Amino acid sequence: MKLQGKVALVTGTSPNIGGGIAEALAAEGAALICVDAARANAEDCANAIKAAGGRATGKVCDVLDQDQVRRTVEEACAEFGRIDVLVNNAVIFNKKGVLNMPLAEWEKQIGVILTGAFLFTKHVAQSMIDRKTKGVIINIISTAGHQGEPGNIAYSTAKCGMLNFTRSAAMELVGHGIRVNSLTPTATDPTESDVRAARWGRAVPSPNPARDAAFDVFRRGVPMQRLPRPSDYGRAAVFLASDDSDMMTGTDLRIDGGAVARYWAWNPARENV
Ligand SMILES: NC(=O)c1ccc[n+]([C@@H]2O[C@H](COP(=O)([O-])OP(=O)(O)OC[C@H]3O[C@@H](n4cnc5c(N)ncnc54)[C@H](O)[C@@H]3O)[C@@H](O)[C@H]2O)c1
């Protein structure tokens, strides 16, 4: 087990990507602090990890509230001794463009993504420095942070900002033995998240041809012609959290089936038929 004895805190532990990453870290031996503004997502994730034989706790915390972030980090360190791994994953989606995005919604979405990562990085890194422990921080980006996506202005702007937040924090913290890297997912096959949600006791979604068609459009644009699953990101997060990546800091690891590397004019679906 690559993370035996480590303590990891993941924000935004829905049954989708955050839950998948939390379960992957736990499967490699890490104890987990599952943090979410929604109590069900914090507690269901922690309960699933405990049911699989791991050690975990769920914490309700709004990543935008500095007092709650500080208290969550203090409680986690009191209960588990320290935090070795932080995954900044929490997000809200709100697909609006520059012309129709109200200022308050822009500030909220930018805030959850960027300010939330800033606050957790600040307080978790300080807790590592105070204890003189080395640590790892992983920021979850999106292919929308690498490219100009129309109609998703706050999301793609904040995710691009996270890339340089990662590099800047990596430079600032390298002298303390804290590595900071990012992980880029892309449009994600929803099947595994549905299975995870059902395993967590949530309702099984009914068949949804419109959703399947929307994901098929994404799939056809990916050079590998299939979409990644949360467990694919989970394995990458284990790599970034473990000593296997101990010479990596300030780097982005893309798990996108080749989406960002694709030459813009090449249609991989058309070429393959
Ligand atoms: N779903 C995708 O296809 C996709 C693609 C690329 C990147 N990503 C990235 O992966 C990450 C996870 O995405 P997901 O699809 O699993 O999202 P999700 O909506 O399923 O989960 C996000 C979680 O964040 C929590 N959250 C929201 N605001 C919060 C706050 N203020 N404080 C604490 N928690 C809060 C929500 O309650 C939720 O549990 C995000 O960073 C997202 O940008 C997702």
Image (cartoon, helix red, strand yellow):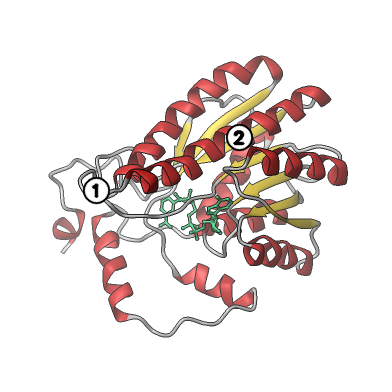
Task: Check disc 2 and give the amino acid type.
Answer: Leu
Q: Nearer the viewer, residue 153 or 10?
A: 153
Task: Check disc 1 and give the amino acid type.
Answer: Gly
Which of the two labelled residues, at mark 2 and mark 1, occupies the earlier sequence position? 1
Residue shown at 57% from the left, 43% from the top: 64
Which residue lies under the disc numbered 1?
97
Residue 156: image x %, image y %? Answer: 34, 42
Disc 2/disc 1 C-alpha distance (Å): 26 Å
Residue shown at 75% from the left, 42% from the top: 71
The crowding category of the residue bearing disc 2, from other C-alpha atoms within 10 Å (few below 14, some 14 to 19, many at least 20), is some
Residue 15: image x %, image y %? Answer: 57, 65
Left or right: residue 156 compared with residue 22: left
Which residue, as the protein is rendered here, is positioned at the far bottom?
Answer: 206
Q: Nearer the viewer, residue 37 or 82?
A: 37
Which residue, as the protein is rendered here, is positioned at the far top?
Answer: 175
Is residue 70 in view?
Answer: yes
The C terminus lies in which quarter of the figure?
bottom left
Residue shown at 44% from the left, 68% from the top: 190
Which residue lies under the disc numbered 2?
119
Q: Nearer the viewer, residue 119 or 31?
A: 119
Left or right: residue 71 compared with residue 240: right
Quadrant of res 39: bottom right
Question: SS for tag 1?
Answer: loop
Left or right: residue 111 compared with residue 60: left
Question: SS for tag 2?
Answer: helix
The crowding category of the residue bearing disc 1, from other C-alpha atoms within 10 Å (few below 14, some 14 to 19, many at least 20), is some
Quadrant of res 63: top right
Label placed on residue 201: none
Residue 183: image x %, image y %? Answer: 49, 41
Q: Nearer the viewer, residue 203 or 246?
A: 203
Is 145 placed above or below 18 here?
above
